[in-house]
Amino acid sequence: MKHKIGKLAAATALATVLAGPTWAQVDVEWWDFLGGGDGVRMKALIEQFNDEHPDIQISATTLEWGLPFYTKVRTAVAVGQGPDIMTYHLSRLPLALEEGVLSPITAEDLETAGLSTSDFFEATITAASTDDGALMAIPFDIHAVVTYYNRTALEGTEWIDADGNLTNLSSVEDMTGLLTWAKDNGFSDPLSFQSEGGGGTWRMFYTLLRQQGGEMLTDGEVLAGDNMDKAVKSIQVLADWRAAGLIPEQASYEASVGLFSGKRSVLHINGVWEVPTFKDSAEADTLGYEWFANEVPQLLDSPATWADSHAFAIPNDDDMSQETRDAVLTIIGWMEKHSLAWAGAGHIPAYKPTVDSSEYATLQPNATYASLANNAAFDPRSKIAGVGSPIYDAVDNLIAPAVHGFLSPEEAAGQMKDQLQSLLD
């Protein structure tokens, strides 16, 4: 009789399983703009989360990066058709505040996610908050420009130390000396970066500006006071390097990467997101030399490096249920605590416990350039700044031409000031 009861119980249990789970599943709509290696890693994280959380299932959609993504978000949220969670660049936060597309993250929300603001690098929390301290997104990473370099070519020179890191680069003159040496030793474009287009040129210009303590915007004024002189100096440095043949003429993004991979550049300044590219090339033995990456050297008055952050944001939707919001916060907390996998894309996790972990310490070159988290120079807090913004357009139309000799640095900085100021007045 016991045997028959046991068989009956097993059959009942099987029927329950076949009929479906007994929990109430929460479906969460997710939007991101992550392509390439970022997209591969995020899809893997989403799949792992879904496997581990049968009660919460993420349905993810990847949209076009940049301005198209943010236009879609603005339109969708306005008509109540936005996602439940989305990735967001913190450089876009000021414009998001003006558009009213984000829902504030409360202390109770952080508690639900199992997080606190002290878990994150201070610069990221500042960038994710309003001027009065209201948190509007939860940072996921810091992605900045770093200096990739050909270790093999620099071996035995004064610019590499016993540990294989860059050294003796503490002024513009020092950098010019290295690049001139490289030019004389067969590197046709000693320092490569995206010199065609606003993105790469902006990151170079802004890094040099911030290393002088310069500010693009001060109390609503563009390049106020001596910031104009600092902007001119930043452009002049790049223009001098271009005139001497030390940086490429109007290199597209892909071409700039190719110059370094093809041993035509000894240095390459680009985002940390290219780490997987060079790792894959090295593992496939197609690079032909040893590479590494360090924080961008301090060439001027203080350490600073252009940076931005991918963050998680919740759209401003009064109709979102508490159940869905709690599910979203559970997802965010889980992602932060699994951000070591995201670091594989080259990014520095914004979640400090990951960066402080022994596992992260073995991740190279990430662990070596993680110091830049303390020197991250985020874009100006303004509606005219950030990814796909008017500042990028102004750099593309004015600063890049000045670097290539079509305008003087003074003309470019002056016209940029006038153009951007008109958008704020």
Image (spheres, grey):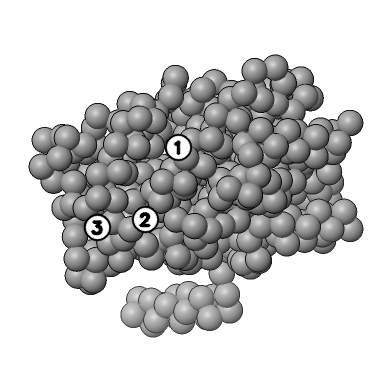
**Residues under labels 1 and 2: Cα distance?**
37 Å
Helix, strand or loop under label 1:
loop
Q: Residue at x 45, y 65 (%)?
A: 255
Place residue 263 in its image quadrant.
Answer: bottom left
Tag 3: amino acid: Gly
Q: Position of residue 189 (x, y in %)?
A: 36, 55
Residue assigned mark 3: 186
Q: Residue 278: in sight, yes or no?
A: no
Number of other residues with Cα within 10 Å of mark 3, as a class: few under 14, some 14 to 19, many 20 or more: few
Q: Nearer the viewer, residue 35 or 12?
A: 35
- The disc label shown at residue 351, or none: 1
Q: Position of residue 154 (x, y in %)?
A: 18, 46
- Give left or right: position of 398 versus 348: right
Q: Position of residue 22 (x, y in %)?
A: 58, 66
Place residue 60 in its image quadrant.
Answer: bottom right
- Tell us which disc is closer to us: 1 or 2: 2
Q: Position of residue 383 (x, y in %)?
A: 77, 38
Residue assigned mark 2: 189
Helix, strand or loop under label 2:
loop
Tag 2: amino acid: Asp
Looking at the image, do the residues carrying marks 3 and 1 touch, with CB atoms under 8 Å apart? no
Number of other residues with Cα within 10 Å of mark 1, as a class: few under 14, some 14 to 19, many 20 or more: many
- Tell us which disc is closer to us: 3 or 1: 3
Q: Is residue 280 above or below residue 419?
A: below
Quadrant for the C terminus in the image = top right
